[in-house]
Image (cartoon, rainbow, N blue to C red):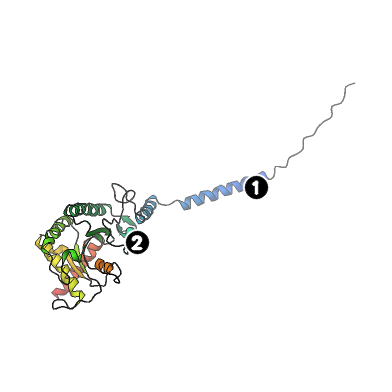
Amino acid sequence: MSRKKGGHSEEHINESWLLPYSDLMTLLLAVFIVLFAVSTINQTKAANIAESFGSAFGMFRSGSGVLSGGEGVLEVITPMYDSFSDQVLRARLDAAMQPQADGEIIIVDQELIDLQETMAELQEFFEEAGMDSRVTMYIDERGLVISLADSVLFDPGRADIRHNIQEMLIEIASVIDKLPNIIRVEGHTDNVPIHNDIFPSNWELSSARAARVVRLFITAGVDPEKLTISGYGEFRPVAENETSVGRALNRRVDIIVLSSKYDSLERQSQTLAEIEAEQ
């Protein structure tokens, strides 16, 4: 008699949860796609931002003047003072940037390269002349700055350029005159008042010293229309005037090859001055 096989019924599995789960996964996928699309940024703008931050932290891209290797947008050849360092970081970010028609900021590569090459040529000349420790050069938002201590150029309280230094100034003029930029010569003093028969105040002394340098540049063949003069007296210090070292740093003449941004502003000022003079 055959034994009757007992039947085993399969337990029914409830799969109703799969539908809402698949809907949830689809919804999450859609959310991530939307987030990715929203977070995608313009590559040009991203590059500009990266370059800006790179410039701010002292990087320089070989061959184009923006990132990696070197001092970057602001390069100090022979630092003359430490107090200027607090202003350096801001200057690095602004130095080679110029607003464009669409409002974006880009690095002006070629101008920065030209200024760097000019600075390198001058540095070689100063080293050969044994003057590299007495001249400070750097590039900031204004352009290429060549800063000379007053003790190099003048006797105390005087504006006549020493004869043994005139050839050096003529060589500086011949190098920077190769660039089309305007050249601004600034005279600066410390805060010690001056009272003599020639200069009643530091304003007159600083202006006269800048004017003598400009006159020598013109004699050397620099176009007078490229030259401007500013005398700031003691009101643009780069160091504290409480010490003799700080005062010595403040007594200086800055020769500035203006960047294109400041160059255009200077030309506009010249034009306005000429119009006012005619009136």
Farthest-out residue, front: 244
User: Furthest-right residue in view?
Assistant: 1
* Circle number at residue 20: 1
Secondary structure beneath dot 1 equals: helix
Give coordinates of residue 25: x percent, y percent: 60, 46
Q: Which mark is residue 90?
A: 2
Q: Amino acid at mark 2?
A: Arg
How would you rate the neighbour count of disc 1 (Cα within 10 Å): few for under 14, some for 14-19, many for 20 or more? few
Asked which secondary structure carries label 2, the reply is helix
> At x 61% / y 47%, what residue is drawn?
23
Q: Residue 7 in the image: x percent, y percent?
A: 82, 31
Give the side of residue 1 with respect to residue 230, left or right. Answer: right
- Front residue (pair 166, 53): 166
Q: Position of residue 174 (x, y in %)?
A: 14, 56
Identify the image quadrant of residue 155: bottom left
Q: Is residue 215 above or below residue 24?
A: below
User: Mark 2 or mark 1, which is nearer to you?
Assistant: 2
Residue 229 in view (yes/no): yes
Residue placed furthest toward the top: 1
Left-right relation of 103 to 34: left
Asked whether the beta carbons under mark 2 and mark 1 sit within 8 Å of each other, the answer is no
The quadrant of the image that shows the C terminus is: bottom left
- Name the foreground residue: 38 vs 235: 235
